[in-house]
Image (tube, rainbow, N blue to C red):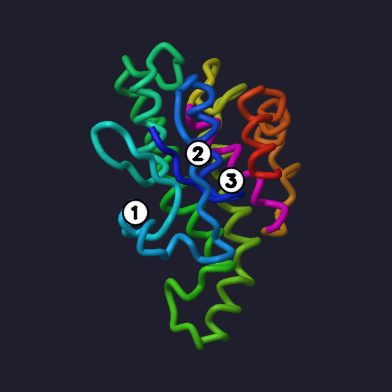
Amino acid sequence: MIFYYAIQTVSVATQIALEEAGAEYEERLIDFRTTEQKSEEYLKINPKGRVPALVTHQGIITETPALLVFVAQSFPEANLAPLHDPFQFAKLQEINNYLCSTVHVNHAHKMRGSRWVEDDDEQSKAAMTAKVPKTMHESFDLVEKEMFVGPWVLGENFSVCDCYIFCISNWLAGDQVDLKDFPKIYDHHLRMRERPSVQKVMAIHKL
């Protein structure tokens, strides 16, 4: 497999999962500083021009929730998802899809405003940026109170949800949100940093 990633992006979540699974894969860094994600070569891998992307022997997979489930199902011995419990597996996907569709989008309003308004609409982009601390705090407050079971996201067993929550929790300081406002997630964040897989990925992404 070939894993395309950019440092300090949502790629972190899938890369932790790959390491937890003991997967064999090649790393391919996409340099956002040179807009390599928009290069003709990379657009052949992912026409969306985003990361991450994973090349498998069956084809290419994009989008973090899909990638996390793929890793969990491809390496069942790693026990990264409740594969034999339909309800719990649905809860896993519920959380991951919320992180993808709502939390990540809230964060992106800070520096990706041109996805929603014209490039020269500085007033609208500034308004979106200004609201990021509020929307990110509200999002993590919901996760803390309604989704996070503890000690891991789904309960007693570590899962790919933990990779995803940890990844996004690293963005909070830059979004002017104090991680300590969420005691369970803060404790989780500290415990995640003790895992060998996380330490390896943190070194790659300079976190």
Instruction: Measure how far apart labels 3 and 1 are at the Cα level.
Output: 22 Å
* 191 or 187: nearer the viewer: 191
The residue tagged with tag 1: helix, strand or loop? loop
The amino acid type, in three-letter code, at marker 2 is: Glu
The answer to whether 85 appears left or right of 203 in the picture is left
Residue displayed at 61% across by 49% down: 8
Residue under circle 2? 27
The residue tagged with tag 2: helix, strand or loop? strand
Where residue 61 appears, x then y in whole percent?
32, 42
The amino acid type, in three-letter code, at marker 1 is: Asn
Numbered label attached to residue 46: 1
Instruction: Measure how far apart labels 3 and 2 are at the Cα level.
Output: 21 Å
Where residue 68 appears, x then y in whole percent?
41, 33
Residue under circle 3? 168
Q: In the rendered view, would you say 58 is above or below 119? A: above
Q: In the rendered view, would you say 58 is above or below 75? A: below
Magenta part of the chain: 160-174
The answer to whether 134 appears left or right of 112 in the picture is right
Quarter of the C terminus within the rendering: top right
Where residue 187 appears, x then y in whole percent?
71, 30
Q: Quadrant of residue 50?
A: bottom left
**Residue 121 falls within the magenta-colored stretch:** no
Badge 3 or badge 2: first in the primary sequence: 2
The amino acid type, in three-letter code, at marker 3 is: Ile
Mark 1 or mark 2, whichever is nearer to me: 2
